[in-house]
Image: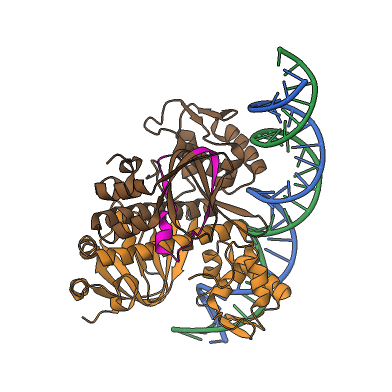
Chain colours: A orange, B brown, C blue, D green
Amino acid sequence: MHSVLRTIKPFEACSDDLLSLLEEGAHEQNCPKGKVLFILGDEAKRFYFIKSGWVKIFRETLDGAQAVLDVIPHGHIFGEDALFGDGEYDYSAEVVEHADIISYPLFVLKEELSKDNDLALAMMSVMARHRRQQDKEIEHRSIQNASQRIGCFLLRLAKHDKPDEPVTIHLPYDKTLVAARLGMQPETFSRALSRLKDKVGVRVKGATIEVDNLNGLIEYSCSACSAKFPCKE
Amino acid sequence: MHSVLRTIKPFEACSDDLLSLLEEGAHEQNCPKGKVLFILGDEAKRFYFIKSGWVKIFRETLDGAQAVLDVIPHGHIFGEDALFGDGEYDYSAEVVEHADIISYPLFVLKEELSKDNDLALAMMSVMARHRRQQDKEIEHRSIQNASQRIGCFLLRLAKHDKPDEPVTIHLPYDKTLVAARLGMQPETFSRALSRLKDKVGVRVKGATIEVDNLNGLIEYSCSACSAKFPCKE
DNA sequence: CGAGGGTTTGAAGTGCATCAAATAGTGTGG
DNA sequence: CCACACTATTTGATGCACTTCAAACCCTCG
């Protein structure tokens, strides 16, 4: 069976039958920036795979205040966790960089999960990883200051195989969104980033950021984090 | 099979055999306040059930800054999610109110999960619930101010079946810890709580808090949250 | 070239943290 | 039962980080 899902986490070793069934109910859509895929409270019928582009996962109050939980890239799925709740999504999802999205029926996945134990184990592994990321997220937002959060974000974007060599980092989406992703205002982001220039000598040109080496960043950001540098996953 | 685990979430419908095996490797300990059960990075061999008392789940940096992820009551388990990672706990756990703790070997659970699909499904359900709580936690800490977070915390403590009647709420552990649980300093907690007195008319006597009805609190706190009042789980 | 959104900068305000000290509460030994 | 020691909590004063509001700037794209 030929399916993009085969390449990613819970589906790497699943049955061909499952993928066939999923692809049968698949629906691909080409989404412009701003397209809202679903909002918190919507009845959850499908889960989504990002073929290209970026999707913002967030929660929003009635008066428009919004907390960005994550911004996820191509090759990831979302909405699948609605399987275990009360049948509603409990966050909202919006395309933030023009994206190709494929959605699949949840019930197919649900049925297979109750038959295929290996799939269930793989799914648990995905969920557990997610949990760890969230734990870290909570820690970051409570302990690190704005500049440290940015530094940490840059480190996660950088290839960290050779920390002693110069590195060029591209911000994957616009700064306003990075700011929101890190739980701060755009103005704060701008100022905190220029504070990073002084502190650890990064050079910023638009969305491109250069550093002579990662050590300064590591010392600056990771000192305010319980994880040691080559940050797990 | 007679086991406390039978009464709680992933084990309600599991096999007697599993419980027997778990109880065989069980180890009960009477823990004074301050007892550290494990810290982030420890090799994960066991998971824990709280028979009585309270346990703080947190992450701590080298210089002592600490982010409290949760404070969990009797009848809950923790540490079980280490099953799916790299074999290490990724948070620390400390007893904060004198507790009876029973620990069980993780490998028994792990083996059973790969044989008993229903157990796996139940476990996923537990994990998904946890994820939802964390999402909400991130939202609260980014959108709500100190007083609103306290109000929300009180609402979760209150029986919310009759929101129009007077309610008495007891703080389940000391105020310093509640403050940390809500991501604020003790001083801030104290001041934010007395702001609640003015705003919604709560009365505070030590660890006891009274309100004529919950409506004021609901309006005040839930307006800064994406969830509608009778907060799910 | 001009419109509009993203980004930066400035000025001012706010909420929370921090430091310091007073007060209340709790358990201990005499 | 009291005095003491120790911790939890409150209160005050001050500082800092981040937000907010406003305006300028820059960049891209029609």
Q: In this view of the protein, which residue sits in the foreground, B221 or A63?
A: B221
- Regarding residue B184, the answer to whether it shows in the image is yes
Residue B77: % across, % down: 41, 47
Q: Is residue B166 above or below residue C10?
A: above
Does the magenta-highlighted stretch encompass residue B30?
Answer: no
Question: Does A6 sit left or right of A60 as displayed?
Answer: left
Does the magenta-highlighted stretch encompass residue B91?
Answer: yes
Q: In this view of the protein, which residue sits in the foreground, A231 or A142?
A: A231
Q: Is residue A226 above or below residue A197?
A: above
* Quadrant holding the N terminus of chain B: top left
Question: Does A33 sit left or right of B99 as displayed?
Answer: left
- Regarding residue A187, the answer to whether it shows in the image is no
Looking at the rendering, the stretch of residues picked out in magenta corresponds to: B73-99
Q: Which residue is painted at 28% across and 59% down in the image?
A: A44
Residue A50: % across, % down: 35, 74
Q: Which residue is painted at 20% across and 76% down in the image?
A: A16
